[in-house]
Image (cartoon, rainbow, N blue to C red):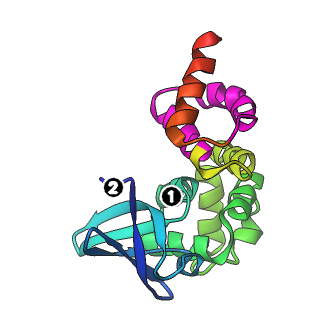
C-alpha cells in the first residue's frame, strides 16, 4: 500500500523509529534504526504487513533494502522479525552476496537461522539477487536524485538492461532533479 514516507524522525529506539508525517507519527520497525538522525527529515521505504495479530510497518533506508526484505519473506520459515534480524546483523550488500555465492555456513551466523533455514534461503534466493547486487554496486556513487530517476524508469516499464545502458551517460550530466534526469533519460531511450 505504501511505497515510502517522507517526514521528520522524532524517535529512535533499538528496533524502530517514529517518523512524523503531516502530524501523524508512524512507528516503523527497521533493521538499522540508528542510521537515521533524530529531528531530521528522512525518506523511508515502507512495507506494510497485515496479520491477524495486527498491522505493522517496516522501514528501510533504500528501496533495494526493502526488495531484499521482501525476498527474505518469500523464503519458507522466514517471517518479518527473522528477516529484520538477518538484515540488522549484516549490511545488505554482504548478505545478498553471501546468498548469491551459496554460503550456507555464513548464513547460520544470523539469529534464528539454523543450517536447514540457511539452506532454504540459498535454495529459494540463489540466482534471484543478481539484480540487487548489481544495482547497489552500480548506483552507490550516484546522486540520490539520479538513483530515484533510475528506479522510476524501471517502474515506468523500461527493462533494467535498458536503464543500465543509459546510466553512465546520465551520470556524466550536471547534477539535476529526479524529473530532470527522467526527461534526459527518456530522450536517450527514445533515440536507440
Q: Main secondary structure of the magenta part?
A: helix
Which callout, 2 or 1, points at the residue further toward the start of the chain? 2
Q: Residues within 10 Å of mark 1 (few under 14, many from 20)?
A: some
Label 2 to label 1: alpha-carbon separation: 12 Å
Q: Which residue corresponds to the image point at 73% horizontal and 45% vertical from the top-left? A: 138
Position in image of residue 101 (x %, y %): 78, 54
Height in image: 188 above or below 160?
above
Verify CB contact (< 8 Å) between mark 2 and mark 1: no
Please say whether residue 178 is visible from this viewpoint. yes
Q: Quadrant of residue 19?
A: bottom left
Q: Nearer the viewer, mark 2 or mark 1?
A: 2
Q: Is residue 177 magenta?
A: no
Please say whether residue 79 is visible from this viewpoint. no
Q: Which residue corresponds to the image point at 49% horizontal and 75% vertical from the top-left? A: 40
Height in image: 149 above or below 123?
above
Height in image: 170 above or below 94?
above
Magenta segment boundaries in residue numbering: 146-174
Quarter containing the C terminus: top right
Q: Secondary structure at mark 1?
A: helix
What residue is disc 2 on? 2
Q: Secondary structure at mark 2?
A: loop
What residue is disc 1 on? 66
Position in image of residue 43 (x %, y %): 47, 62
Position in image of residue 157 (x %, y %): 47, 27
User: Disc count in the image?
Assistant: 2
Position in image of residue 100 (x %, y %): 72, 52
Pick the residue in front: 159 or 12.
12
Amino acid at each position: 500500500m505504501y511505497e515510502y514516507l517522507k517526514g521528520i524522525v522524532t524517535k529512535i529506539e533499538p528496533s524502530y523509529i517514529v517518523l512524523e508525517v503531516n502530524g501523524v507519527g508512524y512507528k516503523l520497525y527497521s533493521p538499522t534504526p540508528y542510521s537515521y538522525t533524530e529531528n531530521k527529515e528522512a525518506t523511508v521505504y515502507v512495507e506494510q504487513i497485515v496479520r491477524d495479530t495486527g498491522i505493522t510497518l517496516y522501514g528501510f533506508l533504500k528501496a533495494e533494502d526493502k526488495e531484499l526484505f521482501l525476498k527474505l519473506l518469500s523464503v519458507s520459515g522466514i517471517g518479518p522479525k527473522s528477516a529484520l534480524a538477518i538484515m540488522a546483523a549484516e549490511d545488505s550488500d554482504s548478505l545478498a552476496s553471501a546468498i548469491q555465492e551459496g554460503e550456507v555456513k555464513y548464513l547460520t551466523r544470523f539469529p534464528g537461522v539454523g543450517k536447514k533455514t540457511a539452506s532454504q534461503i540459498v535454495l529459494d534466493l540463489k540466482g534471484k539477487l543478481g539484480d540487487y547486487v548489481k544495482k547497489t554496486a552500480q548506483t552507490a556513487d550516484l546522486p540520490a536524485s539520479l538513483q530515484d530517476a533510475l528506479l522510476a524508469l524501471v517502474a515506468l516499464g523500461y527493462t533494467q538492461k535498458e536503464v543500465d545502458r543509459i546510466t553512465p551517460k546520465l551520470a556524466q550530466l550536471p547534477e539535476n532533479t529526479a524529473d530532470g534526469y527522467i526527461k534526459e533519460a527518456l530522450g536517450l531511450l527514445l533515440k536507440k
